[in-house]
């Protein structure tokens, strides 16, 4: 039996992404699917409302071609479910003549001086998305099909920010409600079309365990608020759920069933993590203990293609209790190199640790192999051998993982080590 069921499952996940195109949802509403994200078109009396604007110029151009097959009315209003570039970067193509671009004011604004970490953010993002990997290496980006890069961006910024929990708008005869829905972002807004019973849910639902804590890094994503936003979907009881990524879902009961279990999954992890924290457990101990219960863990919509339970647990811990795990040993500090040198001395020297790492790799204990390599690298001993061995361990860990972001990060770092 293969060990690489994670990789196989991620390959099978390619079948979950809708083909690029347009699909009529109701008389007035069309769902636009792209390579990287989705958008929704609503026909008004004389113009169209667009909700989200695809991931790049290329997807924007393809979507505009689809729009022109169904209507000649101009797109005069654009609403963003959230202001992430993967939903804004086709706007300059799709909504070049928009008179108004609406988004929600974030609950928590971007932290001050965030521009000082732009470079590391970009570098970690490229690793998370696997830019530079081949299609076979990458497989997909977890919430969308394979992309070699984000491509050309034509971002249009919002011209109007709405505040508050709920705003009712009438856009050229289309009744629209914007409902605050913190989750994947602090500016997430549901776009509810009450007359159509259609909900554009942004990134609070997609066909994967949610990415509560992306490995590229970012401000704390409020997992408890995310649960409440899923409850909002259940209260609205839409007939059509149009997410920002992966396939649309139709049928009121089907959506209730889907979102109930999705909510249950996230809620369970949030509550069990907090209860464990309250007992004094550390993040490491919580990752070992808290897992989705049997009745939820095999559900297709809770597979860890994009988000991951263990990362969610760590994120909740630091979000609520901060960096300190409660062990007083960690109140102090030991320089990284000095600690590694002491560890090597205790183990009988660098050569013995390298041999142990080689044995761990041969024994299919790749995590331990990588950790032993880290001691050598921290001590700056046998560096070429440790880099080579760690690259091999990461390449196997990548294949064991169902999570696209983890896979990409492992593989990109393995390539860097091999250089
Ligand atoms: Zn997105």
Image: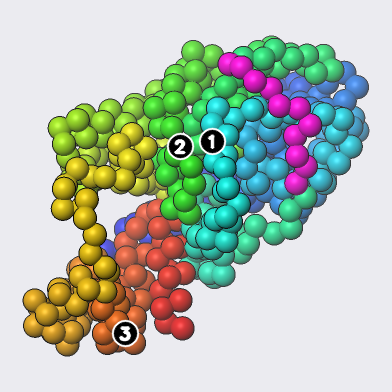
Disc on res. 185: 1
Q: Is residue 359 above or below residue 313?
A: below
Q: Judge the density around disc 1: few (<14), some (14-19), many (≥20) Cα neighbours within 10 Å.
A: many
Q: Position of residue 301 (x, y in %)?
A: 42, 37
Structural distance between the alpha carbons of marks 1 and 2: 6 Å
Of helix, strand and loop, which one carries label 1? loop
Vertical arrangement, residue 64 with respect to residue 372, above or below: above
Mark 3 sits near ligand 1, with its Cβ under 8 Å away: no
Residue that appears at 17% across and 40% down:
281
- Look at mark 3 in the image and give the residue it sits on: 383
Q: CA distance from mark 1 to mark 3?
A: 40 Å
Crowdedness near tag 3: few (<14), some (14–19) or many (≥20) residues, C-alpha within 10 Å = some
| Between 78 and 245, the one nearer to me in the picture | 78
- The quadrant of the image that shows the N terminus is bottom left
| Element carrying mark 3 | helix
- Residue sitting at 54 percent across and 31 percent down? 108
Q: Position of residue 337 (x, y in %)?
A: 26, 74
Foreground label between 1 and 3? 3
Q: Can the viewer see residue 19?
A: no
Q: Spatial distance from mark 2 to mark 3, Cα to Cα?
A: 37 Å
Residue range highlighted in magenta: 155-165
Residue visible at 51% across and 28% down in the picture:
182
Tell me if residue 159 is in the magenta stretch.
yes
Q: Nearer the viewer, residue 200 or 123?
A: 123
Q: 205 and 63: which one is in front?
A: 205
Residue 29 in sight here = yes
Ranked by sequence position, the earlier of labels 1 and 2 is: 1
Q: Which label number is shown at residue 221?
A: 2
């Amino acid at each position: 039996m293969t060990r690489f069921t994670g990789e196989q499952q991620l390959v099978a996940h390619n079948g979950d992404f809708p083909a690029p195109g347009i699909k009529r949802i109701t008389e007035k509403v069309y769902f636009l699917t792209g390579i990287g994200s989705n958008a929704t078109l609503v026909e008004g009396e004389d113009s169209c409302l667009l909700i989200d604007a695809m991931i790049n110029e290329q997807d924007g151009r393809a979507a505009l071609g689809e729009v022109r097959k169904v209507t000649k009315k101009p797109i005069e209003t654009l609403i963003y479910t959230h202001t992430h570039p993967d939903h804004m970067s086709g706007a300059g193509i799709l909504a070049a003549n928009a008179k108004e671009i609406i988004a929600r004011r974030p609950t928590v604004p971007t932290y001050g001086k965030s521009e000082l970490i732009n470079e590391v953010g970009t570098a970690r993002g490229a690793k998370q998305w696997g830019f530079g990997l081949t299609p076979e290496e990458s497989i997909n980006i977890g919430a969308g099909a394979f992309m070699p890069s984000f491509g050309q961006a034509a971002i249009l910024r919002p011209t109007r920010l709405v505040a508050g929990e709920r705003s009712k708008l009438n856009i050229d005869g289309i009744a629209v409600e914007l409902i605050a829905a913190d989750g994947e972002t602090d500016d997430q807004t549901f776009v509810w079309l009450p007359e159509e019973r259609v909900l554009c849910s942004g990134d609070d639902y997609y066909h994967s365990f949610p990415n509560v804590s992306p490995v590229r890094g970012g401000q704390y994503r409020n997992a408890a608020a995310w649960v409440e936003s899923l409850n909002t979907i259940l209260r609205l009881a839409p007939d059509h759920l149009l997410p920002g990524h992966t396939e649309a879902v139709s049928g009121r009961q089907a959506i209730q069933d889907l979102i109930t279990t999705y909510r249950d999954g996230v809620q369970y992890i949030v509550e069990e993590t907090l209860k464990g924290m309250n007992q004094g457990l550390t993040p490491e101990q919580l990752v070992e203990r808290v897992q989705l219960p049997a009745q939820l863990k095999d559900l297709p919509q809770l597979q860890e293609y994009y988000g991951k339970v263990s990362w969610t647990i760590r994120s909740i811990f630091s979000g609520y209790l901060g960096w300190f795990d409660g062990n007083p040993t960690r109140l102090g500090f030991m320089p990284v190199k000095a600690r590694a040198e002491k560890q090597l001395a205790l183990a009988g020297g660098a050569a013995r640790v390298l041999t142990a790492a080689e044995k761990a790799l041969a024994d299919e204990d790749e995590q331990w192999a990588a950790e032993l390599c880290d001691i050598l690298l921290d001590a700056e001993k046998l560096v070429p051998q440790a880099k080579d061995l760690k690259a091999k361990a990461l390449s196997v860990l990548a294949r064991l993982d169902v999570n696209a972001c983890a896979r990409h990060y492992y593989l990109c770092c393995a390539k860097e080590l091999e250089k």
